[in-house]
Amino acid sequence: MGRKYPESMSDEEIRREMNRLSRRGFVFGGSFGLTAVAGWTVLHGQLEEVNRRPWPIRDVLEANERLWRRFHDVDRMSPTFPRSRVGNLRVNGRHGIREDIDLARWNMTVESPKNGPKEMKLSLDDVRELPRVEMITEHKCIEGWSTIVHWTGVRFVDFVMKFGLGTRSGKAPDPTRPGDLVHVVHASTPDEGYDVSIDMASALHPQTLLCYALNGETLSPAHGAPLRLVVPHKYGVKSLKRIGTIRFTDERIDDYWTRRGYDWYLGL
Ligand SMILES: Nc1nc2c(c(=O)[nH]1)N[C@H]1C(S)=C(S)[C@@H](COP(=O)(O)O)O[C@H]1N2
Ligand SMILES: [Mo]
């Protein structure tokens, strides 16, 4: 009963197919999650798992993957560069980071369906325990400049898996239960002076990082110490400096820039 989705399928056909699948009650719960999970599952070398998955989950997965690739290219990897191309990143934007904070006492608040309004606090050490990742990508600002930068941190998807975040059940995200994932990740500075709202597929992209170092040095306060978000396939505005709170939710929460009329997705 497996269906094939030929390369030649038009956007209109994909939309019709999505509607067909959602009438069958599968899609919405899993539409962001499935793609995200498909993306990182494949990229983590577990293609086998995806292929073994029973229909019609595979139908939804393929339709979603195709849809998101077409409209947002979320599974596409941002280009990476050699060290020789790395430049100096200017400081741009001080919303939510003007006041000094005590870095030694910093921790972040995490709100996920699992703990809900009950606060979960994580320290920098909790984050640093995750596998360390280095990445040299281009940081693009919506104002029209860009710089190649060397980031060090951890994958957001590893963070989510380790602490069982973003799922309704409170368990770690499971590629066979994509409908368990919430749709939106919202992050803000400790004083709520700046915030970003991101689709779950983008948050789970393997190049979306929580970073604690820039160009080989511990992050400076102006660049977002002690921990910032880096989302290379979106404009720089979404790479929130100085994380205070991360919320996992199904609400497409507005953020600093969408409240000022910018597009929510802001993908590159
Ligand atoms: N807290 C906070 N994060 C922020 C901003 C900001 O004003 N405040 N500006 C954003 C914008 S527009 C860009 S281009 C990048 C710039 O990061 P940098 O200052 O490390 O170059 O941070 C993003 N994250
Ligand atoms: Mo920016």
Image: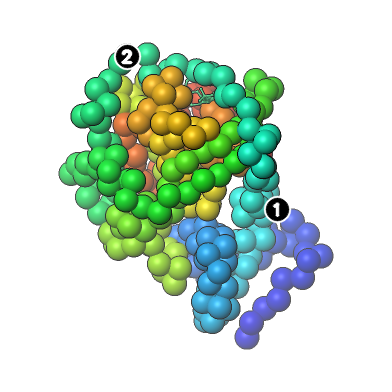
Apparent side of residue 150 relative to residue 3 in the rendered image (left or right): left
Apparent side of residue 79 relative to residue 92 in the rendered image (left or right): right
- Alpha-carbon distance for marks 2 and 1? 42 Å
Res. 189 image quadrant: top left
Of residue 27 and residue 150, the one placed in the foreground of this image is 150
User: Please, what is the three-letter code of the amino acid marked with disc 2?
Assistant: Glu
Residue at the limit of the structure toward the right, as seen here = 8
Tell me the residue that label 1 is attached to. 70
User: Please, what is the three-letter code of the amino acid marked with disc 1?
Assistant: Arg
Q: Are marks 2 and 1 in contact (CB under 8 Å)?
A: no
Q: Residue at x 67, y 61 (%)?
A: 66
Res. 229 image quadrant: top left
Image coordinates of residue 231 in percent, x first then y, are 53, 40
Apparent side of residue 10 relative to residue 76 in the rendered image (left or right): right
Q: Residue at x 63, y 86 (%)?
A: 1
Tell me the residue that label 2 is attached to. 99
Of residue 110 and residue 9, the one placed in the foreground of this image is 110
How packed is label 1: few (under 14 Cα within 10 Å), some, or many (20 or more)? some
Say which label, 2 or 1, has the lower sequence index. Answer: 1
